[in-house]
Amino acid sequence: MTVIIVAPLARIAEMAVRHGAREMISLMAKEQAFHRPAVIQAHRHLLLHMNDIAFKGTGNLVAPDETHAREIIGFAREWDRTAPLLIHCWMGVSRSPAAALIAALSVSPEQGDSALVRRLRTASPFATPNARLIQIGDDLLGRGGRLVDAVRSIGRGADADGNAPFTLALDEPTAGTF
C-alpha cells in the first residue's frame, strides 16, 4: 500500500522510523530550525520555506507560491513509492495536509478529488489544508477547481494540539491516525 504520512515537526523522527520513510518534504518558516531524521538522506529531503498563510506575504512572512507547489509536484513524482513519503510542517494541520493532497494527485492523477479529500478528513479530523497552496496545486495539476471545491466542502478541521500524525493512502480508501 502506498501511503503519505503527515506529521507535526515534533513527531517526524518517530514517524520516519516507525513507517520506514526514506523521503521527506518539510514546509517550515525560514526561521524555524530542526534536524532531519537520520533515516532520511539529505538528497531525498525537500525543504520549502513558507509560512502558514493564505495570502501574499507581508513583512518577513512568506506565502506559499507556485515555485513551492512545483517543487512538491516534482519531488512527489520522483518518489519511488517503495516506502512512505513523510510530509510535515510545524503542527501537521495546514501546510502538510495541503502538500499531501498535491503529492497524492501528482503520482495518482486518476483519483477523484472528492474521494481523496474525504479520505483526508477521515484520517484527520484536524486537517485544514492551506487554501493558497491548494489553489496553486489545483491550477498546476489541471484539476479545474475540483481540488479547491473538495477541500472547501470538508470545511475547517477541529482544533488541534499539533500532535496528531496520520496516513493518507493513495491506492485504497483506508487511512488512519496514530
Image (cartoon, rainbow, N blue to C red):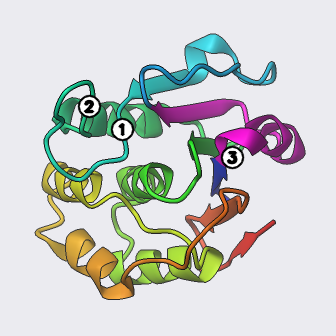
Count every numbered label the image shows and give the total. Answer: 3
Q: Which residue is mark 1?
A: 51
Q: State the separation of the CA atoms marked 3 and 1.
A: 25 Å
The image's mark for residue 105 is: none
Residue closer to the observer: 158 or 142: 158
Percent coordinates x, y for residue 124 in the rendering: 61, 74
Say if residue 81 shows up in the picture.
Answer: no
- Residue type at mark 3: give it: Pro
Percent coordinates x, y for residue 74 in the rendering: 35, 33
What SS does tag 1 mark? loop
| Residue 119 shown left or right of residue 5 in the figure | left
Q: Quadrant of the C terminus?
A: bottom right
Q: Quadrant of the N terminus?
A: bottom right
Q: State the separation of the CA atoms marked 2 and 1.
A: 5 Å
**Image-quadrant location for residue 150:** bottom left
Q: Residue furthest bottom?
A: 153
Percent coordinates x, y for residue 82 in the rendering: 70, 42
Q: Where is 77 relative to 127, above or below?
A: above
Residue closer to the observer: 18 or 162: 162
| Extent of the magenta region | 8-28
